[in-house]
Image (cartoon, rainbow, N blue to C red):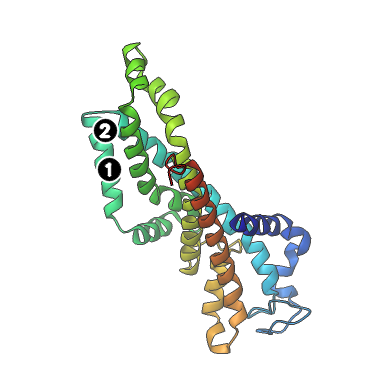
Amino acid sequence: MFGLFILVFFVLVALTAPLLFPRTVLDVTQATGQPFSPPSLEFPLGTDDSGVSVLALVCWGARISLLVGLAATVLSMLIGTTVGISAGHYRGFGGGALDRFTDWFLVIPYLPLAIVLATVLGRSLLNIIIVIGVTSWPGTARLIRAQTLSVEGRPYLERAKALGAGNVHQMTKHVLPNVMPLVLANTTLAVSISILSETTLSFLGLGDPDNVSWGSILEQGFASGAISQGAWWYLGAPGVCVVLVVLSFNLIGRAIEEILDPRGDAR
């Protein structure tokens, strides 16, 4: 419940950001504060190197960070679930090829691969979502494949095969419903990884230059010398937001995992 409260708070902040702070307040030409001003009544979280309110940047950054995290996770879950069920259902060359394909992605270091793809595709919001989605699915595929192998040995699936059910029918009507609890539990945990990935890529200068995210705020603060200026609020505010959102998704994910765990009653 604590994690859900934090998540709902940040979702409301992201949805109401245009009402709380018009887009024009992010324009450096209309900044009303002094550069690197500490927190005050006028600027509760201080200002950045251009005099723009850090609170406004954090509120607008929540929109992009949450959007990228959720969209990239959905893409990752779609790829991972499809590959995992297919690898566990099909035998012979097809299932083996998908299994080896997953292993190949697991062997490659995640961050260097994401950096290379982001550099090749270019800096845009859609490309960041694609990069994170197509590089973070192998772990999900491995989990879903293991669960699929367990489901494949159950009597009702053997009966469906005996009655002439096709592969698509078996996977969608029998296997998928039985692996969905694991998919849902893993989704909430994967969102936090996607948000951290977006923050990392934006901090490295590979994010969308036209939109503000928590990662881009950190990147701009580091580049402008916030550390040497002692402007702890510039880096601290978005950093704390990332930590809280990641914590909330992890808490929710662990709770869902315990609720859906069939061994929970035994404990």
Residue 92 lies in what quarter of the image? top left
Residue at x 47% of width, y 44% of height: 75
Q: Is there any visible trace of residue 126 in the rendered image?
A: no
237 shown above or below 23 = below
Q: Considering depth in this image, is 108 or 163 the residue closer to the camera?
A: 163
Q: Considering depth in this image, is 117 or 227 the residue closer to the camera?
A: 227
| Left or right of 179 on screen, residue 54 | right
* Image disc number at residue 101: 1
| Left or right of 139 on screen, residue 125 | right
Residue 174: x and y, percent?
Answer: 42, 25
Residue 110: x and y, percent?
Answer: 35, 57
Classed neighbour count for the residue bearing mark 2: other residues with Cα under 10 Å, few (<14), some (14–19), many (≥20): some
Residue at x 35% of width, y 33% of height: 148
| Left or right of 157 on screen, residue 235 | right
Amino acid under label 1? Phe
Residue occupied by mark 2: 95
Residue 206: x and y, percent?
Answer: 47, 63
Look at the numbered disc 1 and give the secondary structure of its residue: helix
Q: Considering depth in this image, is 123 or 264 the residue closer to the camera?
A: 264
Q: Is there any visible trace of residue 190 in the rendered image?
A: yes
First in sequence, mark 2 or 1: give its number: 2
State which mark lies toward you, 2 or 1: 2
Residue at x 26% of width, y 33% of height: 95
5 shown above or below 33 = above
Q: Residue furthest top?
A: 163
Amino acid under label 2? Gly
Residue at x 67% of width, y 64% of height: 59
| Left or right of 249 on screen, residue 134 | left
Classed neighbour count for the residue bearing mark 1: other residues with Cα under 10 Å, few (<14), some (14–19), many (≥20): some
Q: CA distance from mark 2 to mark 1?
A: 10 Å
Residue 132: x and y, percent?
Answer: 44, 53
